[in-house]
Amino acid sequence: MLNQWLTNQTVKTIDSVQDWKEAIKICAAPLLNNNSISSNYIDAIFQLHESIGPYYVLAPGIAMPHARPEQGVNKLGLSMLLVKNGVNFNSEENDPVYLITLLAASDSTSHIELLTQLATLFAETEDIQTIINAKNSDEILTVINRY
């Protein structure tokens, strides 16, 4: 199921970024391009981060930025960015983050199955390590295609 959402258009790799905001912008770009989200959604993530901290850094090396559906989601969407050199999100226990998966949920239920698949992936330490060590998006997609 993940391979319906994570494709060559929505999975990117990059060596480094200036900061966490740039990482989120790069990760969100495919969802802006396919009209899953508006720029308001990115702004909402930034505002939430500033007010409550990096709530979306889930585990060491993994972040899943998101905001509320009404904050700029047009349709369900998912994108992934691998930052090979990592980026700090000011999450003491979990920095640096290498894998960023941006979720755009259009309502409170349509994304549940997608989240379940992502949780299964994130729980597989070996697969996550393979993704983090990937040299390009094709190597990431090889792992994604198993979910």
Image (spheres, rainbow, N blue to C red):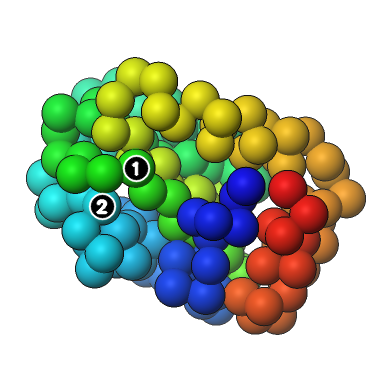
**Residue 87 visible, this angle:** no
- Looking at numbered disc 2 in the image, what kind of residue is underneath it? Ser
Amino acid at the residue labelled 1: Leu
Residue closest to the eye, 123 or 94: 123
> In percent of the image, x 52 and y 42: which residue is there?
63
* Whether residue 117 can be seen here: yes
Q: Which label was assigned to residue 36?
A: 2
Label 2 vs 1, first from the N-terminus: 2
Which residue is located at x 67 percent, y 78 percent? 138
**Which residue lies at the image location 45% right of the left edge and 31% below the top edge?**
111
Closer to the camera in the image, 140 or 113: 113
Disc assigned to residue 76: 1
Q: Please, is residue 143 above or below residue 114 in the view?
A: below
Q: Is residue 87 shown left or right of residue 29?
A: right
In the image: residue 41, left or right of residue 139: left
| Mark 1, other Cα within 10 Å: few <14 / some 14–19 / many ≥20 | some
Residue 90 vs 147, above or below: the answer is above
x and y percentages locating residue 85 in the rendered image: 60, 69
Residue 49, given in percent of the width and then of the height, sits at 29, 33
Q: Distance between the Cα atoms at labels 2 and 1? A: 6 Å
Please give the name of the residue rendered at 71% of the width and 39% of the height, measured from the top-left corner.
122
How crowded pointer 2 is (Cα within 10 Å; few <14, some 14-19, many 20+) is rated as many
Is 28 left or right of 112, judged from the image as shown? left
Q: Is residue 49 above or below residue 139?
A: above
Task: Classify mark 2: helix, strand or loop.
Answer: loop
The x and y percentages for residue 114 are: 54, 36
Query: Are the residues tagged 2 and 1 within 8 Å (C-beta)?
Result: yes
Secondary structure under tag 1 reads: loop
